[in-house]
Image: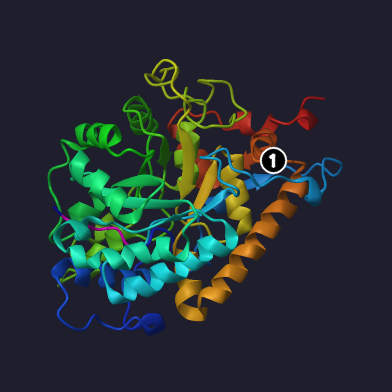
Amino acid sequence: MTQPHGPGGSGASGDAGTASGLGAPSGALSETARRKDDHLRLAMAQHTPDRPRDYDHVTFVHHALAGGASDAVSLASPAFGWPVPLYVSGMTGGTEQATRVNRGLGVLGRETGLPVAVGSMGIVLREPETAASFTVVREENPDGFVLANTNANVTGAQAAHLVDVLGADALQVHLNAPQEIAMPEGDRDFSRWADAVAEIVAAAGVPVVVKEVGAGLSRGTIAVLRDLGVAAVDVAGRGGTDFGAIESARRPEGERAYLAGWGQSAVTSLLEAAGLDGVGRASSGLASGVAGVAGVAGSAGPAGSAAVALLASGGVRHALDVVRALALGADAVGVAGTFLHTLLEDGPDALVALVQRWLSEIRDLMALLGADDVPALRRTDVLLSGPVREYAELRGLDVTAYARRSSWSQV
């Protein structure tokens, strides 16, 4: 059983060196702990915010008289009653360096109200002494929303134990087959993951969020996860931290580098989810099945079940990317790489200030678009172009429906 999962949100491949004070791991670290520190260093090296992403091909139609008032905007997320539509995607844990990161993230959650997910906690099952590197998040943020994190190879009982260790409000289960294939010591059997998710959902005792780690989720995958009873899916698409590139960089000769960039972006994954029954706690602005894929559209979730929250992460650089994802149907948007870079380069106070600025900018952008709450963003007019449009057309998704959602386009 491998325990991957470092940061989930920045850049392209490269040699980390000793970026931002994260030098080579020292001391008698276990192989798992050493790998986690490798992930931090290599993820920092990938931080290139100017690199093009699919978000660049999502633009809003401007209606000059549609604007509202920033003071009247509600930032409440439809997901889990969160006070803001922004959360910290799972990054790390299990080492001294990771402890410092998680302490800073705990402070961030306490000061801003952001929900915070920790990195993969599987190491705790084999090395219980590492638990403190995760629980520091809860110590710093005793009243906030905190998510535990594990892979899909644990049993239901083990998942419940990790939730208890952290005192978590929810549990992330990450799916990361491309990373495992790239990883020298990675898993090679993913055939039981669906059954494992069902077992974890039944045993965890808290809502379960299933996420990718940078390769996105297809419509069919989201439909299966919905039917397995998960509370939320996080599409966690390509464009952020690239674990194919990271694991290739850990190989002696850089083998399997072709796995860098595998999968779908968060943008195209959100298009895949549009109109899928029982997914998304606020309307996408599209009728069920309008953007559907043959053979999956119209598939209904379990009778009487609450809608599965739709979360998005991967490659988010600034407040406009957050608003773009929300307009495409996300109930909340996760960030890792950009936050990690700020935390390690400038410290916790700078990260708190960055997030507070983002929240102010999200509010102002929503006012500009005439959206007084997150669901109203699904009724803005969005133009999809370039590779995003090409992907959608090849998948049989109707991109034109997004361009005429508002009342301003119905005259």
The secondary structure type at the circle numbered 1 is: loop
* Placement of 194 over or under 259, stated as above or below: above
Residue 226: image location, x then y, percent: 38, 28
Query: What residue is at 46 percent from the left and 71 percent from the top?
Result: 104
Quadrant of the rendered image containing residue 256: bottom left
Q: How is the rendered protein coloured?
A: rainbow
Queried whether the magenta region covers residue 3, the answer comes back as: yes
Residue 207: image location, x then y, percent: 39, 38
Can residue 30 be seen by looking at this rendering?
Answer: yes
Residue sticking out furthest to the right: 65
Question: For the magenta stretch, what is the residue range?
Answer: 2-6
Amino acid type, residue under disc 1 in the picture: Asp
Residue 372: image location, x then y, percent: 74, 41
Q: Nearer the viewer, residue 181 or 155?
A: 155
Badge 1: residue crowd in 10 Å (few <14, some 14–19, many ≥20): some
* Placement of 244 over or under 219, stated as above or below: below
Residue 120: image location, x then y, percent: 29, 56
* Quarter occupied by the C terminus: top right
User: Where does label 1 land, which residue?
Assistant: 373
